[in-house]
Image (spheres, coloured by chain):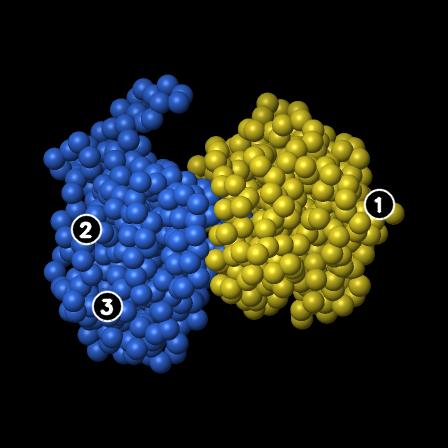
Chain colours: A blue, B yellow
């Protein structure tokens, strides 16, 4: 077998499954996943359609009117949990795992988190399915605009509460700016601090976006612009002037999303994610160039990524983050139940869609490889092996690692005293913890 | 659980040293007392304890340590202003000018005993208002981002001996903060899972992993830490079980109390990024901080008298409320120093005032004191580390003198 087939499934995918043969032509297989919208994402379990914003907002109002007794899950949270189940089941069974990895990458780039409250959880289905996922192989700037206007993001970074201090409502109520979203779009989502923006830019950008918020109590049950909250007057961001009015927010986002500093930042992050913790400068320059030449075409950038020589050798340079790790274990054993994966995420320090801070999860080994977290992995390797103890350990090893398996690992697996121990050793091996 | 003398023939890769470091400790879980009693290590390890609590998300110092006596306080803070001491829901008085948030009752008790020193109008040397830069710089200790933390670099100057069962440094929780990353190996502890493999299977996993340059050392260190913690935590009453931070703080106290246990521990507590509805959102976090420090004290027992606890945050928040009864990212803030070794019962502040012209950029509390002055004093005067260690912890900080008089003689 060509080792590149295995590398493609491990490095760019979520790990092989026994039911899905490795692709004959790895590059063609990866390319195909960068064209079009990706596989359909099934609705949450027990539903025909994903929850619309309005349904979540009505559940939120009902929750506030009569909160469930302690220990009982709010219907709002239940909708969110169901969406988590749907996504992890998709990850476990999908035959387009590169597209899924790209989706997870951009979800982390544009972090929103459950700890942000019902504004995030009610908006998450729409955020994942409509704002983010359609663009992961489209143009970056379109994704930036879509997520920056999506209710989950507007709530998560407090834009729903920001008011122009000199707007009609601001003057009447004494309320004012909340600059959280403005700062994080500049710092984390687009041009990044290396571009040299200042506090004045943050404040001006916050003024530009005043008026944009969410109406959750009545139609449209969605994002909307409230002229009465909008700060009057012209604003200046990164030296460019923007007129008063609702159009300025998207205009500013389109300038930020196509800024050369943004392409440099995104190239750095993509190469760090798919190639190495310390991104090789030549690889970064290559991806940056593609983004610049294509005005931020993420499909083209993805196809350039899989053609980087650095992405194929040496293999296994990256430590799998906990979600990648747990999904790879379950896929290797043919698992399709999202429950155990979701249940393990807190113990491994990466509860799904609940990063502690807006900068998301770390993307380097240093962020995950501390002593106790690695011990938790060994415990979970053992726990997970117990779920699949009737599988043939040699088959699990061949599926998961194939030509990437080291001789030491094969020997240790063959000498194990039980199938559970043998599968534990496959799962705990360094090859399995890397991609 | 069976107790195997751990195996050698089929573990050629690990070597005797690997065993001494990690696996013997793990195998000794059930006979921990014996293992500890067997230790022939030097009893000469320092008896001072230092705990650093990282308050992630930027604690609003003006809401935690309330300058109710400042003539501009009430107007500046508006709806966020807290009532004066003696009024319903009022601040807990700290001597006429400042008061603690009413949820900080244990800390107020410590203040009364002369064991709490609130510090105000303090910040690191950076003026970033980014959490992520701010935290990295606060933990790194330099003027630029560093790959290791100031506490870890200080630890490299605290000698460990081969016979000492615990590492000198201990991190609690599932993440190793940058503060504790670096060359000095650090022990870790997190609450255990219900089922765990037998020691022999751990040994086989460790053997497979030992050559991996990232995972191998982490697993060896993890085994060592678990072996030690199992012994240290097996004696005494069950740990506090309310809430994650309290439990971690209890475990830290229990391990630090051991004669041959760790001496320096790091904990984290998030939830301080209160952009909206701050009054309600800060209460549960302040409560956790308060109860966590109380639990730490409870478990430390006599060792509390040799302990200093430093709680710091990456920066303060805007002095005025924002449009949502919250506060945005700011500059100067508050810190806490607590412990039996601390000369407390007073507030340490060169108070800049809250007049418009006194605020930093007409926005934030003006910092008049540098966080590094506190940390340097703790390294020098509390842990009694040599000047070289303090310089290594805080490079390019020559102009910042260690704060004098923080500690009891």
The Cα–Cα distance between marks 3 and 1, rounded to whole angstroms, is 70 Å
Number of other residues with Cα within 10 Å of mark 2, as a class: few under 14, some 14 to 19, many 20 or more:
few
Coordinates of residue B39 in the picture (x, y in percent): 77, 47
Note whether residue B206 is visible: yes
State the image quarter where residue A50 is shown.
top left
Element under label 2?
A: loop
Residue that lies at the very extreme toward the right in this rendered image? B409
Determine which residue is flagged by label 3: A1
| Above-or-below relation of B381 to A284 | above
Q: How many marks?
A: 3
Q: Are marks 3 and 2 in contact (CB under 8 Å)?
A: no
Same chain for the residues under marks 3 and 2 in the image: yes
Check residue B408 in the rendering and tell me which mark sits there, or answer none: 1
Mark 1 closeness class: few <14, some 14–19, many ≥20 residues within 10 Å? some
Residue at position x 40%, y 21% in the image: A70
Quarter-of-image position of residue A89: top left
* Few, some or many residues within 10 Å of mark 3 (<14, 14–19, 20+): few
Residue A19's tag is 2
Q: Residue A331 appears at what percent x and percent y?
A: 27, 49
Residue visible at 53% across and 56% down in the picture? B10
Asked if both marks, 1 and 2, belong to the same chain, the answer given is no
Relative depth, front residue between B398 and A383: A383
C-alpha gap between disc 3 and disc 2: 17 Å
Whichever of callouts 3 and 2 sits on the residue coming sooner in the sequence is 3
Give the CA separation, mark 1 to mark 2. 68 Å
Q: Is residue A359 left or right of residue B363?
A: left
Relative image position of residue A155 (x, y in whole percent): 32, 43
């Amino acid at each position: 077998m060509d080792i590149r087939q295995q590398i493609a499934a491990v490095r760019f995918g979520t790990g092989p499954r026994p039911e899905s043969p490795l692709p004959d032509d790895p590059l063609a297989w990866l390319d195909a996943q960068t064209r079009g919208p990706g596989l359909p994402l099934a609705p949450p379990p027990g539903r025909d359609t994903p929850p619309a914003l309005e349904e979540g907002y009505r559940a939120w109002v009902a929750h506030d009117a009569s909160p469930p007794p302690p220990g009982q899950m709010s219907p709002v949270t239940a909708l969110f949990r169901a969406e988590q189940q749907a996504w992890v089941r998709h990850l476990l069974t999908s035959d387009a795992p590169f597209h899924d990895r790209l989706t997870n990458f951009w979800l982390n780039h544009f972090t929103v988190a459950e700890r942000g409250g019902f504004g995030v959880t009610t908006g998450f289905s729409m955020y994942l399915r409509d704002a983010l996922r359609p663009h992961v192989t489209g143009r970056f700037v379109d994704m930036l605009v879509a997520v920056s206007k999506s209710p989950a993001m507007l709530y998560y970074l407090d834009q729903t509460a920001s008011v122009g201090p000199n707007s009609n409502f601001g003057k009447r109520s004494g309320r004012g700016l909340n600059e959280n979203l403005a700062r994080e779009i500049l710092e984390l989502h687009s041009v990044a601090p290396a571009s040299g923006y200042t506090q004045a830019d943050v404040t001006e950008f916050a003024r530009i976006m005043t008026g944009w918020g969410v109406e959750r109590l009545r139609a449209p049950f969605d994002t909307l612009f409230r002229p009465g909250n909008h700060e009057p007057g012209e604003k200046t961001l990164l030296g460019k002037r923007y007129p008063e009015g609702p159009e300025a927010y998207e205009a500013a986002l389109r300038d930020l999303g196509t800024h050369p500093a943004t392409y440099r930042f995104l190239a750095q992050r993509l190469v760090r994610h798919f190639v190495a913790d310390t991104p090789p400068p030549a690889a970064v320059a290559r991806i940056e160039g593609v983004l610049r030449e294509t005005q931020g075409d993420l499909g083209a950038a993805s196809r350039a990524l899989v053609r980087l020589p650095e992405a194929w050798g040496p293999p296994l340079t990256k430590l799998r983050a906990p979600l990648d790790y747990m999904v790879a274990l379950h896929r290797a054993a043919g698992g399709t139940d999202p429950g155990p994966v979701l249940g393990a995420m807190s113990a491994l320090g990466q509860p799904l869609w609940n990063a502690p801070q807006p900068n998301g999860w770390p993307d380097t080994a240093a962020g995950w490889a501390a002593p106790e977290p690695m011990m938790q992995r060994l415990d979970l390797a053992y726990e997970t092996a117990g779920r699949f103890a009737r599988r043939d350990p040699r088959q699990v090893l061949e599926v998961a690692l194939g030509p990437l398996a080291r001789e030491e690992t094969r020997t240790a697996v063959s000498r194990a005293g039980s199938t559970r121990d043998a599968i534990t050793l496959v799962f705990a091996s360094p090859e399995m913890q890397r991609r | 659980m069976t107790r195997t003398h751990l195996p050698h023939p089929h573990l050629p890769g690990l070597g005797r040293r690997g065993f001494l470091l990690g696996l013997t400790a793990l195998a000794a879980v059930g006979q921990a007392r014996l293992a500890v009693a067997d230790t022939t290590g030097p009893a000469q390890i320092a008896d001072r304890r230092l705990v650093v609590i990282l308050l992630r998300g930027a604690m609003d110092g003006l809401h935690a340590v309330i300058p109710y006596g400042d003539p501009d306080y009430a107007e500046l803070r508006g709806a966020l202003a807290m009532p004066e001491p003696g009024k319903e829901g009022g601040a807990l008085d700290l001597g006429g000018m400042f008061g603690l948030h009413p949820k900080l009752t244990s800390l107020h008790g410590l203040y009364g005993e002369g064991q709490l020193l609130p510090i105000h109008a303090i910040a690191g040397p950076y003026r970033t208002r980014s959490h992520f830069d701010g935290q990295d710089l606060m933990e790194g200790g330099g003027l630029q981002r560093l790959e290791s933390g100031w506490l870890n670099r200080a630890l490299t100057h605290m000698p460990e001996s081969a016979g000492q069962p615990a590492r000198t440094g201990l991190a609690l929780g599932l993440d190793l903060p940058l503060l504790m990353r670096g060359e000095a190996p650090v022990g870790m502890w997190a609450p255990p899972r219900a089922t765990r493999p037998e020691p022999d299977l751990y040994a086989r996993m460790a053997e497979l992993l030992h050559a991996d340059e990232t995972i191998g050392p982490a697993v060896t260190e993890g085994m060592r830490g678990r072996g030690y913690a199992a012994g240290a935590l097996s004696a005494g009453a069950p740990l506090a079980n309310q809430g994650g931070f309290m439990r971690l703080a209890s475990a830290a106290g229990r391990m630090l109390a051991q004669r041959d246990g760790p001496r320096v521990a790091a904990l984290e507590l998030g939830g301080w990024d209160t952009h909206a509805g701050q009054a309600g959102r800060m209460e549960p976090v302040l409560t956790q901080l308060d109860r966590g420090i109380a639990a730490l004290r409870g478990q430390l027992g006599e060792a509390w008298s040799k302990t200093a606890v430093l709680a710091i945050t990456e920066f303060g928040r805007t002095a005025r409320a924002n449009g949502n009864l919250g506060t945005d990212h700011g500059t100067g803030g508050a810190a806490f120093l607590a412990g039996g070794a601390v000369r407390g019962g007073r507030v340490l502040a060169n108070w800049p005032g809250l007049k418009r012209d006194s605020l930093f950029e007409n926005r934030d509390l003006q910092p008049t004191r540098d966080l590094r002055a506190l940390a340097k004093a703790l390294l020098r005067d509390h842990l009694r580390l040599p000047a070289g260690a303090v310089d290594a912890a805080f490079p390019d900080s020559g102009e910042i003198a260690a704060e004098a008089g923080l500690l009891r003689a």
